[in-house]
């Protein structure tokens, strides 16, 4: 039966494919295809894991203390039975042979199918056996990982690719995915994503957007309503997921998919055209990246530098072993070198809120009882609370500055005391490098303006820093007191709110008066609905996902800043600026 699920659009375009449901706890299972010729070997791998788990359970049974309750042994019998049950063994093979899934993925897929069946059982006893099945699958997955000598199944092997000859395209459906896990899906087999939780500017959504594939977040019931292998249409423009569409609906979406592919190809041609408005204003379009490996894509997209490298992603998925100074230095140097002389802005770690160091998703964080993570120990607050680690990062950044044009960006500052403490740590890091005779080069230091307190006293920041960068994602979150990762209040998250616009305008105006560079690196910079507005405010430097550069450039090329500036006051004075912008700037689409 066809049905529609509504959420929030994250990444534009249409994806059509079969659903792959992944439980949040199973997101780190490797997803890759095995060639038909390798299917037998894959099944053999699974069989060996099963035999190993069977012996493991037998040993457990044998070693049970004499006085252990009889139920324990019976429970292990149930595990053995489940392990050898056809519904697990044969069906898992089916995913390998028919769909070419690797063994881990096949197991996880079958677990999802079976878990649903258990959930629907009337009998309490049988329903509760789902937990046993999960434990058995968990053991199997651990065995498989141990056998490949890979405790952590990802990253994907080289032959994991988006296209596998003859396969149906696949879209991923999960209740929630942490930003760290989302990062694992770069170069994965999936052509679209749907999650139950999250807001448009949650970090999971931001990483999903950087994958440049259609995605919908905050679709609440999606993972419950959608079944493994259902056909899905993900409408990343409207934020709608159509489950098992009728042939007519499917044809309509295929048509839109072709049209959007054509549009992309057309925009691609603008890649190397300089971004200059009709009245000759030069605009700098920079890229936001998560890892040094993203730098070539930024150059390829026509970005003239990196405006935001979110360095915290280097610190994720590390099982507690954080990158040391040398490893960080190599990563920063790689990014600087890859950009070949273009400026690279690296932000010091912004850990906390919806970006925990370990792989907790938003839903898990909510259960952690950290009362207000977004207002807690996050970003520079975290760095200043861990001065040793902060200096380690600063030393790595300073060393990388010897290899190119590096700019250091500090997130979430609000207090003069934080500014002072930051520069003190920087001075100490420099002294430490000098003492040990290690080289460092020229660099600039900038502040993110993303807390209303900072925007309101931006002059203070302009006195201390070489440049400022407006983080509109957090500026909106903190101005409106709306958790950007919470789908329950997502309808109130509005960067077009007059108060947010005034803070942005104020920051740009004061920076220009002080003669200091100002840029926007939040999601507004890559949203074409905001391009004219930001140009009208005087902004000439935008930093966004590489995939957005061409579309924003097209808006810049068609803009006349003199005409826009005249309309700005009307927009800023309006009760509903988004609607007014449509009237004032002409082609702007609100929202
Ligand atoms: C922002 O807040 O706008 C920003 C760019 O930083 P992040 O999205 O990483 O919080
Ligand atoms: Mg921010």
Image (cartoon, rainbow, N blue to C red):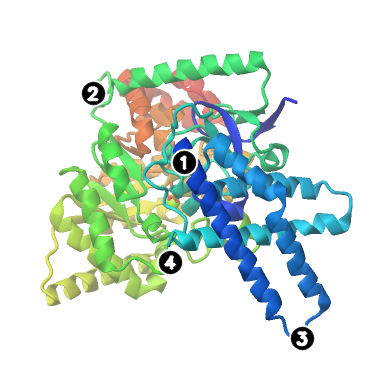
The numbered mark, 3 or 1, whose residue comes first in the sequence reads 1
Of 558 and 318, the residue lying toward us: 318
* Residue 473 in picture, x, y percent from top left: 47, 45
Cα separation between marks 4 and 1: 46 Å
Q: Is residue 515 left or right of residue 357?
A: left
The numbered mark, 1 or 2, whose residue comes first in the sequence reads 1
* Residue 41 in picture, x, y percent from top left: 48, 47
Question: Which dot marks residue 238?
Answer: none
Cα separation between marks 4 and 3: 54 Å
Number of the front mark, 2 or 3: 3
Instruction: Using the image, determine if residue 434 lies above or below residue 272.
Output: below
Cα separation between marks 2 and 3: 78 Å
Number of the front mark, 2 or 4: 2
Number of the front mark, 4 or 1: 1
Number of the front mark, 4 or 3: 3
Number of the front mark, 1 or 2: 1
Of the 4 image quadrants, the one containing the N terminus is: top right
Cα separation between marks 2 and 4: 41 Å
Q: Secondary structure at mark 3?
A: loop
Does the closest atom of ligand 1 sit within 8 Å of the Cβ of label 1? Answer: no
Q: Name the residue at 16% across, 43% down.
A: 340
Q: Are marks 3 and 1 in contact (CB under 8 Å)?
A: no
Cα separation between marks 1 and 2: 41 Å
Cα separation between marks 3 and 1: 46 Å
Q: Are marks 2 and 3 in contact (CB under 8 Å)?
A: no
Question: Which dot marks residue 381?
Answer: 4
Residue that label 3 marks:
66
Q: Name the residue at 66% across, 60% down.
A: 136
Residue that label 1 marks:
34
Question: Which dot marks residue 273?
Answer: 2
The numbered mark, 2 or 3, whose residue comes first in the sequence reads 3
Q: Secondary structure at mark 1?
A: loop
């Amino acid at each position: 039966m066809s049905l529609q699920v509504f959420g929030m659009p994250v990444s534009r375009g249409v994806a059509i494919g079969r659903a792959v449901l992944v439980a949040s706890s199973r997101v780190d299972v490797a997803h890759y295809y095995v060639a038909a010729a390798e299917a037998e070997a894959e099944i053999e791998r699974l069989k060996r894991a099963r035999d190993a788990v069977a012996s493991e359970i037998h040993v457990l049974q044998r070693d049970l203390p004499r006085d252990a309750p009889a139920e324990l042994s019976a429970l292990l019998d149930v595990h053995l039975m489940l392990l050898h049950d056809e519904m697990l063994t044969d069906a898992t093979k089916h995913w390998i042979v028919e769909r070419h899934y690797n063994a881990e993925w096949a197991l996880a897929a079958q677990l999802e199918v079976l878990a649903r069946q258990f959930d629907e059982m009337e009998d309490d006893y049988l329903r509760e056996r789902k937990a046993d099945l999960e434990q058995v699958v968990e053991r199997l997955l651990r065995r498989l990982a141990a056998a490949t000598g890979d405790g952590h199944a990802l990253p994907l092997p080289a032959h994991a690719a988006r296209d596998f000859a003859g396969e149906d395209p696949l879209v991923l459906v999960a209740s929630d995915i942490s930003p760290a896990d989302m990062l694992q899906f770069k170069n994965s087999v999936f052509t679209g994503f749907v999650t139950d939780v999250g807001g448009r500017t949650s970090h999971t959504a931001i990483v999903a957007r950087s994958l440049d594939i259609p995605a919908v977040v905050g679709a609440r019931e999606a993972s419950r309503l959608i079944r493994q292998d259902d056909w899905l249409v993900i409408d990343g423009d409207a934020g709608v997921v159509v489950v098992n569409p009728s042939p007519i609906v499917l044809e309509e979406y295929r048509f839109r998919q072709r049209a959007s592919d054509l549009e992309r190809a057309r925009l691609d041609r603008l890649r190397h055209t300089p971004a200059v408005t009709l009245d000759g204003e030069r605009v700098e379009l920079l890229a936001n990246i998560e890892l040094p490996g993203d730098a070539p894509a930024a150059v390829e997209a026509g970005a003239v530098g990196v405006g935001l490298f979110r360095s915290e992603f280097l610190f994720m998925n590390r099982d507690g072993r954080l990158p040391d100074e040398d490893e960080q230095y190599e990563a920063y140097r790689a990014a600087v070198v890859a950009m070949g002389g273009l400026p690279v802005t690296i932000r010091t770690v912004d850990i906390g809120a919806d970006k925990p160091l370990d792989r907790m998703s938003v839903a898990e964080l909510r259960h952690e009882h950290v009362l207000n993570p977004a207002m807690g120990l996050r970003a520079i607050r975290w760095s200043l609370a861990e001065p040793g680690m902060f200096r380690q990062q600063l030393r790595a950044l300073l060393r990388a500055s010897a290899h190119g044009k590096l700019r250091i960006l500090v997130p979430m500052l609000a207090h003069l005391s934080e500014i002072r403490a930051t520069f003190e740590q920087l001075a100490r890091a420099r002294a430490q490098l000098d003492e040990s005779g290690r080289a460092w080069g020229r660099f600039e230091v900038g502040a993110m303006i993303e807390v209303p307190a900072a925007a309101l006293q931006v002059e203070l920041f302009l006195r201390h820093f070489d440049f400022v960068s407006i983080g509109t994602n957090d500026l909106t979150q903190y101005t409106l007191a709306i958790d950007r990762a919470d789908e329950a209040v997502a309808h109130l998250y509005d960067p077009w709110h007059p108060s947010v616009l005034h803070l942005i305008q104020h920051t740009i105006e004061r920076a220009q008066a002080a003669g200091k560079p100002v840029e926007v690196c939040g999601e507004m910079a890559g949203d074409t609905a905001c391009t004219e507005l930001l140009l009208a405010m005087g902004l000439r430097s935008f930093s966004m996902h590489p995939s957005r550069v061409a579309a924003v450039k097209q808006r810049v090329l068609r803009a006349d800043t003199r005409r826009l500036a005249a309309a700005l006051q009307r927009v800023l004075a309006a009760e509903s600026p988004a609607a007014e912008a449509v009237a004032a700037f002409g082609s702007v689409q609100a929202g």
